[in-house]
Image (cartoon, coloured by chain):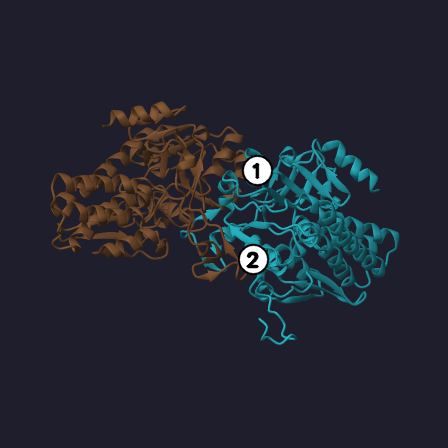
Chain colours: A brown, B cyan
Amino acid sequence: MSGAPETSPVPDPAAAARPAPLPPTLAWHGGEDGELALLDQTLLPHQRRVLAVRDLETAIEAICALRVRGAPAIGVAAAYAAVLGVRAIAPPADFQSATAAVCARLAASRPTAVNLRWALDRVSRAAVREATLASLLREARAVHADEVAMSERMARFGAPLVPNGGCVLTHCNTGRLATAGDGTALAAMFRAWQDGARFRVLAAETRPLLQGARLTALELAAAGIPVELCCDSAAAGLIARGAVQAAFVGADRIAANGDFANKVGTYGLALACAAHGVPFYVVAPTSSCDLGIADGAAIPIEERDGAEVCALAGRPIAAAGVGARNPAFDVTPGHLATALVTDRGVLRPPYADAIKALLAAGR
Amino acid sequence: MSGAPETSPVPDPAAAARPAPLPPTLAWHGGEDGELALLDQTLLPHQRRVLAVRDLETAIEAICALRVRGAPAIGVAAAYAAVLGVRAIAPPADFQSATAAVCARLAASRPTAVNLRWALDRVSRAAVREATLASLLREARAVHADEVAMSERMARFGAPLVPNGGCVLTHCNTGRLATAGDGTALAAMFRAWQDGARFRVLAAETRPLLQGARLTALELAAAGIPVELCCDSAAAGLIARGAVQAAFVGADRIAANGDFANKVGTYGLALACAAHGVPFYVVAPTSSCDLGIADGAAIPIEERDGAEVCALAGRPIAAAGVGARNPAFDVTPGHLATALVTDRGVLRPPYADAIKALLAAGR
């Protein structure tokens, strides 16, 4: 290549094919009269539209419709949405009651992820300490900053567990789109890749709403990490054939004994990994832990509209008139998790005492 | 309702909502100069189009594209397609070699289901016995009639295993659309329903090509059997919550030890059923048994185009440029099957000697 001018940039074909970086998953713009900016994830990967949310109803609709989703991200979004809701009640006769009412409405928007309640409890307590909108916004910003910091710490603890030279199975989306930071399970992979580990990712497509196909594949491709999709149902057979060296998933709520709820399909993947001795790692912040729930049986499982299963992008895919069961989550017994990777360290089973000690240490 | 005229028919709302009966899955019309009629299953449930197939290439395309699918149905379709293929070589210099060449092409169209080879072996042997097109067509018709009879016998053996008052999980399509008769696993349900058992069916949608959502739900609704869909990944969690009393699936190839290949996703369902003590029944004709294969590891697994995963009805659903693993089948160890229901009786584990004895008895 002696004829080429020295200043000519060497094209990186891999980088050229990479999707452009995404806008932030969520952000608060301005002060107390500001607005919540949400990247509408239902339109990804085809369209990138940022919603300017200025009222409670719009925020609740965005959470219910999964325009913002992922346990940590909906916690942060709800904290900011509480500011919007209380701001609209002007002037509230009883600031604390108004805040509590707004938080109760937000908490009911999605039942399974406990981060939503964790964030709203913090905002409610801020209203008790100081009955001003400034106090609520300050707390929402603190929730946001804490989730970013937890994401960073989970990545650091999880990265060494990513099998160098192997294939990592993941489910749903646990990256930047699911959190305020780099993610949970996916953050561990981003960090491992930055640290020099080389691996491939097998992303389960995650029916019905295809977060794996639409979001995880996009995030990994944008980061230059090799990724292939598979149907959720194909993972077990691929695991049996030795195609997977470790699985990394997130969690929407972890009970006191280590049982955890996560996107529907997680339990089946955990059973398949256990049957073939493949390590199964759960990466979640302490904001996903719920000591108030003894075991997985008590975790409320959101049942969503069967239409999500019977149609795809508005097009019916099933026989007319046929309905569907559509649980959005399932519960995996803690003993199937090889380790729980949290922002305060890596726990190994049995989890009950370890989780309790972890949460007590952070108070 | 004394005012209503006695002759007024009482409307049956359930029957009114039922889909109309489907045209036959496949049929041969005419004699040696006839044609193979195939219901194009890729268009269901939205369109009902019957293809008139008069040449080998069209038949192979129909099998590869899953216009006709289901292990028993593709066996019968291939037997008739062999007649079309040999007919076009006029006059064949060596009738047996021509038949063998046509059968070899058909056998290569889909690798996993052994019924295809079973049917084509019969046609090839017919050419040896009598080197005429009439002989081939006679044998294809015999293959067809035998599959219908096997379907009837599987239904009779399987029906008593359907849990009265319970919920039956099934995967992919194992009904009239998968066979020349009433089906395999679904035929047992049709028969149980006719015999007075009452139950509900939970049909896994069966990504990527949605045979559960498109075909099984249609067949069950047409028969008046209550059916709900679920995402393939939702089944394990529903099983854990006690929502399923038995699972019934088909098989595309059963190895000598009882390991079996079936539509991808079957293995994960079998693991979940085993974890929760839910009976897992495999219903398949003896034409799906392959004593030439010792165990599941040797069953060839068809890997189909990743585009089936990354797009749906031509619409991309994944991030651009991302590929997919797309095995069409997986292998379930025989020990996870509570029973194998065949056209010659119900086998219980361990299967190795039972399968051998069964096939020997039928010779």
Q: Which residue is mark 2?
A: B214
* Mark 2 / mark 1, whichever is N-terminal: 2
Q: Residue B12: x and y, percent?
A: 60, 66
Residue at the image position 76 percent from the left and 41 percent from the top: B345
Give the Cα distance between marks 2 and 1: 24 Å
Q: Residues within 10 Å of mark 1 (few under 14, many from 20)?
A: many
Q: State which mark lies toward you, 2 or 1.
A: 1
Q: Quadrant of residue A347?
A: top left
The three-letter amino acid code for the residue at tag 2 is Arg
Q: Quadrant of residue A147?
A: top left
- Same-chain status of marks 2 and 1: yes
**Image quadrant in which the C terminus of chain B is located:** top right
Dot 2 falls on a residue whose secondary structure is: helix
Q: Is residue A279 left or right of residue A188?
A: right
Q: Numbered disc 2: what chain?
A: B
Q: Which residue is farthest right?
A: B130
Q: Residue B334: x and y, percent?
A: 65, 35
Dot 1 falls on a residue whose secondary structure is: helix
Q: Numbered disc 1: what chain?
A: B
Q: Which residue is mark 1?
A: B273
Q: Residue A212: x and y, percent?
A: 41, 46
